[in-house]
Amino acid sequence: MKLTSPAFSEGGKIPLKYTCEGEGINPPLEIQNVPAHAKALVLIMDDPDVPSFVRADQMYDHWIVYNLPPTLHRIEENATPPGQIGKSTNGKLEYVGPCPPDREHRYFFKLYALDQKLDIKSGASKKEVEQAMERHIIAHTHLMGRYEKQKKA
């Protein structure tokens, strides 16, 4: 399975447009080689580089989407994907653009193929989605982008 974006490469800089300093919209994503027997996809975008003075767990969940159709090949820019939306760290049920408080952070777009749809309500947290996915992941991949806020003159 493969996850890419025409907006940035693996390990590359996430364009300003997709961050809190830009339009704050989701980047386009392309999905390839989903296993034929997959029943659902899960997309999680998170930032594991949060300083402990901001969050004790040093993690920020930016986007949680589950029960995406396994036939999905593209998520368009600024689009609501055809799945159930989970709750980001700030409580919103939508994409939350990168907005690191201190330095460059890594942002992981994690894609999972599952052998069944998740039987959980919309608005679930990342932890609830991850618990529901246990023992049902048949493939996974990720795309990592980086972002640092622009320096003020």
Image (cartoon, helix red, strand yellow):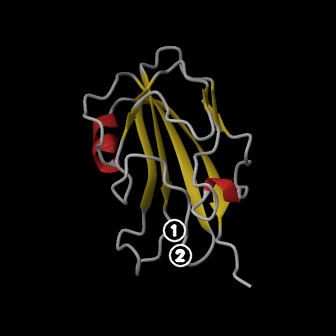
Name the quadrant of the N terminus.
Answer: top right
Res 113 label = none
Q: Give the answer, above or below, for where 114 lies relative to 110.
A: above
Res 101 label = 2
Q: Is residue 115 left or right of residue 8?
A: left
Residue at 63 percent across and 71 percent down: it is: 104
Question: x and y percent of residue 36 in the render?
Answer: 53, 14
Res 14 visible: no
For label 2, the SS is: loop
| Residue type pointed to by label 1 | Asp
Question: x and y percent of residue 93 in the render?
Answer: 37, 46
The residue tagged 1 is: 49
Residue at 27 percent across and 44 percent down: it is: 128
Task: Rate crowding at label 2 as few (under 14), some (14 to 19) or many (20 or more) other CA atoms within 10 Å.
Answer: few
| Residue type pointed to by label 2 | Pro
Quadrant in which residue 52 is drawn: bottom left
Q: Nearer the viewer, residue 33 or 76?
A: 76
For label 1, the SS is: loop
Quadrant in which residue 91 is drawn: bottom left
Residue at 52 percent across and 37 percent down: it is: 111
Question: x and y percent of residue 76 in the render?
Answer: 62, 34
Task: Rate crowding at label 1 as few (under 14), some (14 to 19) or many (20 or more) other CA atoms within 10 Å.
Answer: some
